[in-house]
Every structure is written in C-alpha cells, then in structure tokens.
Image (cartoon, rainbow, N blue to C red):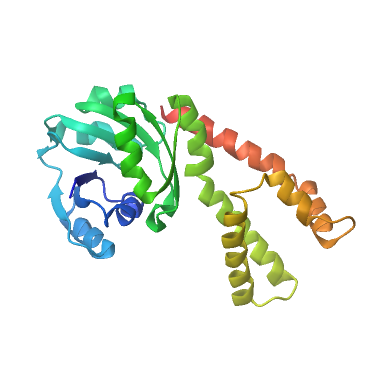
Amino acid sequence: MRTITFIGNGNMALSIAKGLKENYKIEVVGRDMNRLESFEQTLGVTVDKYLLDDFDISEKTILLCVKPNNIEQIAPILKGKAKVIISILAGTTISKIANYIKADGIIRAMPNLAASKSLSMTTITGELEFKDDSIEILSAIGQTRWLSSEKELDIATALAGSGPAYLALIAEALADGAVKQGLKRDDALAITRGLFEGFGAIIQDIHPALLKDGVMSAGGTTAAGYSALEDGNVRASCINAIESAYNRAKELA
C-alpha cells in the first residue's frame, strides 16, 4: 500500500486523511506529539507519527497542509528531496514552494472539508508530469478538476475551497428564517439538511437557471421568496464574495 506523508495535522489534513485512509498508508508529521496522537485517534487507524525535527522527505509523496505563513519555518528542518509535493496552501505559488522545499515535482491542489466524506471538489494544477498521479490520489476524496494555471486555481479556491463556509451561512440563514416563522429549530435544521442533500444531487444534471425556473411558478411562494433574495442583493453578494476571496489569495501569494 502506497504511503502518503502529511506535513501538518490541522482540520483540513484530517479531512483529507479520512478520505485516503482506506486506500493509502498514512504518516503524519507535526510539531507536537500529543496533537499527532489526537490526529491518529480521530482518524481511527494506526498512522506513523513523526516530529518535524530533521524529518527526511526523500522520495516521499508529501501532502503539504501547514498554514501558508509557516512554510518558511518548517522548510529548513526538512531534509532530502521529495518525489512529489501536493500543496493545499492557499495563495502559495509553486515557485515559492520550490524555493523552500526540494522535490522532483510540485502540485497545487485545493480540496474542501467534504474530503472527510469523500465528496470534496478538488481543483488541481502544476507540473504535467505529475498530473495523473495527483488526480489518482485526490480522486480518493471526491471529484477532481485539473486547471491550466495557478491563477485559475486561486479563483477556484475562492469558489470550491471557501464555498462550504458560504453555503453554511446560507443554510443557517434559511433555517433561521423558518424558525422565525414558527418552525421548531430541530425540524428546521433537519429539513435544511435534507434540502442540501437533494439539491446536491439535482444540480449535477441541470443548469442552475433551469432548476430555478422549474421551481418558480408565476405568482407563487418561490417567486415571492426569490424576489426578497434579490432585494437583499444575495446574487451580488455571492459574486463579490468570490472576488474578495480571490483577491485575498493573490495577497497571500
């Protein structure tokens, strides 16, 4: 079984590891052994655990999951040259990673938290030599999409990487709206979860505009609610959210 080495043990690393653990051997590298042990317990499988001090990355497949501003700190204590580095660091360019860590190839990827359910929408770019390999690995946690440039990846990060937070806000707001009108909180949350599960399946096969038109009959309840959303500039706010997140990715770079 192929080994994937995680450098970093935060929430996203754990989510990805949950998706990979059935098909790959996991080893994890971090600063604190107690946190590494917690990572292992939460993951529910035995992993090889190492502290960062003088860790040898030679010929390893690395999933780089540290915070973007930590790369300068960890790079000097990594020894050797990795086979491939798959980085999920937002806004951190391939050239910057290459300046700090040696590897035969570098890939940038942006999964999201649905990786823990093997339902991530992961965007990928980088050196073509490692395209198929990175797609094979990351397909274990959901859908993948290869993009032609790092600019496109940064835009996709604003959409798919940050998107779960935006959808969570919408889900919470819709449930709150139902509670405001008199629905019990537990019922509102259960119905919202069912709504998102069904919508996720339907949207795979139909354009969003056609789906909207199919639900919204003339003078009906959906039309009234949709008009309220337009009054609140929800569409413009979503567009602006992608722009703001993309601009932040460029700042990080």
Say if residue 127 shows up in the picture. no
Answer left or right for 251 relative to 239. Answer: left
Q: Position of residue 170 (x, y in %)?
A: 62, 55
Say if residue 104 shows up in the picture. yes
Answer left or right for 17 relative to 172. Answer: left
Quadrant position of residue 180: bottom right
Say which of 16 and 215 sits in front.
Answer: 215
Q: Residue furthest right?
A: 219
Name the residue located 53 percent from the left edge and 46 percent from the top edge.
163
Q: Quadrant of the C terminus?
A: top left
Answer left or right for 217 relative to 248. Answer: right
Say which of 104 and 172 sits in front.
Answer: 104
Quadrant position of residue 65: top left
Q: Residue furthest front?
A: 205
Name the residue located 73 percent from the left edge and 46 percent from the top edge.
210
Say which of 203 and 247 sits in front.
Answer: 203
Q: Position of residue 3 (x, y in %)?
A: 18, 46
Q: Position of residue 236 (x, y in %)?
A: 70, 39
Name the residue located 72 percent from the left edge and 44 percent from the top edge.
209
67 to 246, vertically: above or below: below
9 to 244, vertically: above or below: below
75 to 204, vertically: above or below: above
Name the residue located 68 percent from the left edge and 46 percent from the top edge.
208
Q: What count of labels does the image hold?
A: 0
